[in-house]
Image (cartoon, coloured by chain):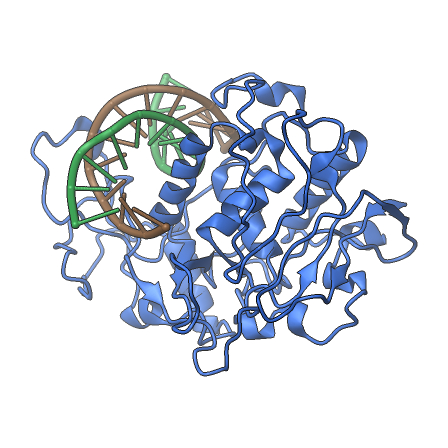
Chain colours: A blue, B green, C brown
Amino acid sequence: MLHYNYNLIATANQSGSYYSKPTTTLIEQSGNSSHGFTTYPSTGSTSVTTSPPSSDSCSSGRNSSSPDYFVSSASSGLSVDQTDLTVQEFEIVQEKIKQEGTYGITKPPYSYISLISMAMKMSPKGQLPLSGIYNWIMDIFPFYRDNQQRWQNSIRHSLSFNDCFVKVARPLNEPGKGCYWTLHEKCGEMFENRGHLRRQTRFKVKERVQPKKKKSAHSKQTKMEIKQEEPDEFLNSSIVASTVTTAEQEEDMKTNVTSEAAGAVSVSHDHASWGETSNVYQSVISSPQTYEAAEPQVSINFNDHYPLSYEYNDFSTSVHHPQNYSSESIVYNSSGTSVKNYDGYQNTIYSSSDPDSARYL
DNA sequence: TCCTAATTCAATG
DNA sequence: CATTGAATTAGGA
């Protein structure tokens, strides 16, 4: 079976790692495959543990040229873990890439939420700066090399709005701006059932209660419910501090995600701007909390987030991308941010608002 | 058809 | 870059 090879190449240097985009090569795979994408081990139906960056598989001392950094159960002949549909989605993406050289210019059938999740899960540390998310998306899905202003704004909105994404402070001695983003340790597989377009339920850590009633309260707000408050300790649990998801926390999560706790609830305020219990509409915003920096006490070099360079086949530079996209290597600086941009890539093949794009998939 | 998740525009810090 | 609001679009039960 043919697979793209995303071998890790240990060529990181002190000035930071970089991605290189080598020439396209297909490698013959037998048995276990190099999947090309990676996810964290899925340990259960309710949790994808966003493991501390320090335990990222990328830095676990494997042979640098071994593709086993990328784990695939789907193409190994084993049954696919139902909780790990992300892997399956990746398989689909890869198939598409194999056929067409790139995912193609069509709009991928994934929501921004799922794109962000994929990018994070694929990254060596499970966390990426905003620019890293942008670049990953553009690398894999050429569609998003257009209309950047629009969708990138949406990405930012998604990151801020959804509790499943949490900020991780940039290590103190690491230059660069912006923080890292990672998945909440207990957001689970958000797209368990079916596609990656719409989740059944939004993952919420804690309901943000509207601090003050805006006048002109709208009709939409009539039908609201009060959801159960999450224990403070849950809210405050550091995402980098706990690898283990306790049974209790599992319960919390389930409750959190699915409950509508009739007649809840004592509200404990740990954020000044959170008002009293009241109705919530869809604008329940996550706490603007920033988690502790990853491995703050560990010596940090610039390669912490991209400890190793890796190269992958250049599916994004194949036949289907417009000519004005040059395929030179993407070089990531110390913060994992690509210095390459697609600014010159404003072709007009698409309108991102083209509702019909997906039908070509 | 309804509920609400997702997207978009855009103001503000 | 990040947060938030509001309006709109759209997935899918």
Q: Is residue A4 left or right of residue A238?
A: right
Instruction: Using the rendered view, name the quadrant where residue B6 is placed.
Output: top left
Task: Indicate the quadrant where residue A193 lies.
Answer: top right
Residue A11 position by quadrant: bottom right
In percent of the image, x 48 and y 72: which residue is there? A247
Q: Residue at x 65, y 53 (%)?
A: A84
Depth check, front residue: A177 or A93: A177
State the image coordinates of residue A219 (x, y, percent, origin top left).
18, 27
Residue located at (34% from left, 46% from top): A161
Q: Is residue A163 above or below residue A141?
A: below
Q: In front here: A298 or A106?
A: A298
Horizontal placement of A200 versus A196: left or right? left
Nearer to the camera, A330 or A213: A330
Percent coordinates x, y for residue C3 in the rendering: 27, 50
Is A183 situated left or right of A319 in this image?
Answer: left
Quarter placement of the N terminus of chain A: top right
Q: Is residue A208 visible?
A: yes
In the depicted structure, whether residue A71 falls above or below residue A27: below
Q: Quadrant of the C terminus of chain A?
A: top right
Point out residue A14 in the picture as x, y percentages from the top left corner. Answer: 60, 71
Q: Using the image, determine if residue A232 lies above or below residue A351.
A: below
Count all numbered tags in the image, as a single digit.
0
Q: Is residue A199 visible?
A: no
Near-viewer residue (A118 or A214): A118
Q: Position of residue A296 (x, y in %)?
A: 43, 78
